[in-house]
Amino acid sequence: MKRVITFGTFDVFHVGHVNLLQRAAACGDQLIVGVSTDALNFSKKNRYPIYNQNDRMRIINGLRYVNFCFEEESLELKREYILRYNADVLVMGDDWAGKFDEFKDICDVIYLPRTPSVSTTQLIEVISSSEGNG
Ligand code: C2G
């Protein structure tokens, strides 16, 4: 049984997130997802996600190739989460390439290519610029 772990905010869930999670699931037998909390996002970006953490967790939990998800409360706890959930593989999008190589002593670390041309930030910009235009 190979367990895969990944982390993310998954705000305004989009096809780039699906692609990442599906390919992460295909790296093993079980996929565990750490969903960053609203407080963690606020501390990092000085703004809250559009979707709150309960809704983001519900969306991730509803995906058939996700076996389990939990709240990621701190970026500094990755090693603890990997050990707590007995993960054999850590998968992240390649915007994080090289950033998690320090965990290669306890699991495989794989960076998957991001889906081009889609991001939560870009979606927020498109939606907010269309408001007020009619
Ligand atoms: N992603 C992707 N393609 C996109 C957009 C996102 O493959 N077009 C991937 C990211 O590389 C990441 C995952 O989807 O692996 C989740 O992306 P975000 O919600 O932006 O998560 P992030 O803020 O990178 O994670 O410990 C990490 C933190 O939880 C933050």
Image (cartoon, helix red, strand yellow):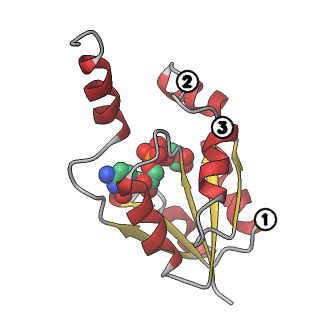
Between disc 1 and disc 2, the foreground one is: 2
Which residue is rendered at x = 48% and y = 59% of the image? 100
The residue lying furthest to the top in this view is 132
Q: Quadrant of residue 132?
A: top left
> CB of mark 1 within 8 Å of CB of mark 2?
no
Left or right placement of residue 126 versus residue 73 in this view: left
Q: Amino acid at mark 3?
A: Gln
Q: Position of residue 122 (x, y in %)?
A: 28, 34
Q: Nearer the viewer, residue 21 or 86?
A: 21
**Which residue corresponds to mark 1?**
84
Left or right placement of residue 5 versus residue 100 in this view: right
Q: Amino acid at mark 1?
A: Arg
**Which residue corresponds to mark 3?**
53
127 up-or-down from 32: above or below: above
- SS label for mark 3: helix
**3D distance between C-alphas at marks 1 and 2:** 27 Å
Which residue is rendered at x = 53% and y = 72% of the image? 104
Q: Nearer the viewer, residue 115 or 97?
A: 115
**3D distance between C-alphas at marks 1 and 3:** 21 Å
Q: Amino acid at mark 2?
A: Tyr
